[in-house]
Amino acid sequence: MDFRLTDEYEALRSSVREFAREVVAPVIAEHYEQHTFPYDVVAQMGKMGLFGLPFPEEHGGMGGDYFALCLVLEELARVDSSVAITLEAAVSLGAMPIYRFGTDSQRARWLPKLARGEALAGFGLTEPGFGSDAGGTATRAVLDGDEWVINGSKAFITNSGTDITALVTVTAVTGVNADGSKELSSIIVPSGTPGFTVAPGYSKVGWCASDTHELTFDDCRVPAENLLGQRGRGFAQFLRILDEGRIAIAALSVGLAQGCVDESIRYAKDRRAFGQPIGNFQAIQFKIADMERRAYTSRLAYYDAAARMLAGEDFKRQAAIAKLHASECAVDNAREATQIHGGYGFMNEFPVARFWRDSKILEIGEGTSEVQRMIIARDLGL
């Protein structure tokens, strides 16, 4: 067993690391403070092919795989999580459902521009009254002739209101199953469709340079062929997408955790107290050693989950473990990095303040820590 990266993976990681340091780092603090979306950065990421990494060339992609995407997310989050989550949501949540479950015509229409980063797509699952209880979906879609009529709302949807957002895929109740349960289906809703309203952006604690909105659908009509995948399979489709997405969020969490290590080492070498760099003190050394331990073990966890996924093996438990462990380690590292920086860690001019604000959502988004524990326990037969 060899966890070392191939030359191709290493070259990709190095190029994105350089991009994050030279392009993202100089501008992201201003975007973060002003709550503005970094369109220029996203455009450059598109030209690099990052939005098309896991998609075949025939669909405008780069012909890579999901692990390549995870490596990129780690390197981006090592500098900034707003940019990283923009890419993660655009690829694994926005474009991936169309690639996995779309018809040939749907793929031909949407995937090329999504893969080039010229357009973004949102993933409309969460609702204001139903967070972890995704099966409680209240949004409804009724087939009226050759159109779906959608009514309802979605909450906390990333990439749903940018100037380049092309569509949102939403889950909706489309009927009742034989056992009396809700029939859930997925439907593509293009931006600008009458009856589809994007609310003003949220005022968020973190991820302040990413795009997040509540969405409402009021007699919103879309063609019947906008059904994504098989009718009644919407919930199962999105569960598959979430399983994959948890590996991506684990990678993003590792990036944030490693970024905390990077910044803490830099600060510990420069900051002096009691006549010497604070990095000479064992209390600081032990904190940073533990931070590196968390990042290292979290990385191994998502590497393993990704390897199982690419091998076609069951990876649900491993993805949940990776997401749970990495997100909690990211929160721990952000807290310790802030402590090491002291009063400066509470100042937004220092990256660790941004890391601290960005870390908590990692224990919530794409399945809370409690949901991950439920998945793990159930997979163990409990």
Image (cartoon, helix red, strand yellow):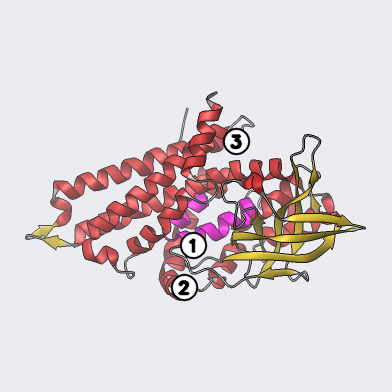
- Position above or below: 71 against 218: above
Q: Which residue is mark 1?
A: 82
**Residue found 74% across the figure and 39% down from its top:** 181
Q: Quadrant of residue 342?
A: bottom left
Q: Earlier in the sequence, mark 1 or mark 2?
A: 2
Residue 91 visible at all = yes
Up-down relation of residue 116 to residue 134 (above or below): below
Residue on which the image places disc 3: 309
Residue 364: mark in rendering: none
* Residue 97 belongs to the span the image colors magenta: no
Residue farthest toward the top in the current orientation of the protein: 381
Answer above or below: position of 379 versus 18.
Answer: above
Q: Amino acid at mark 1?
A: Ser
Amino acid type indicated by mark 3? Met
Q: Choose the circle earlier in sequence order: 1 or 3.
A: 1
Residue count near mark 1 (Cα–Cα under 10 Å), binned few <14, some 14–19, many ≥20: many
Label 3 near label 1: C-beta < 8 Å? no
Label pair 3/2, CB-CB below 8 angstroms: no
Q: Residue at x 69, y 60 (%)?
A: 114
Q: Is residue 73 magenta?
A: yes
Q: Which residue is mark 2?
A: 31
Q: Residues within 10 Å of mark 2 (few under 14, many from 20)?
A: some
Q: CA distance from mark 3 to mark 2?
A: 35 Å
Q: Is residue 302 visible?
A: no
In the rendered view, does 187 fall on the left or right side of 274? right
For residue 92, side relative to residue 269 (left or right): right
Which residue type does callout 2 highlight?
His
Mark 1 and mark 2 in contact? Answer it, CB < 8 Å.
yes
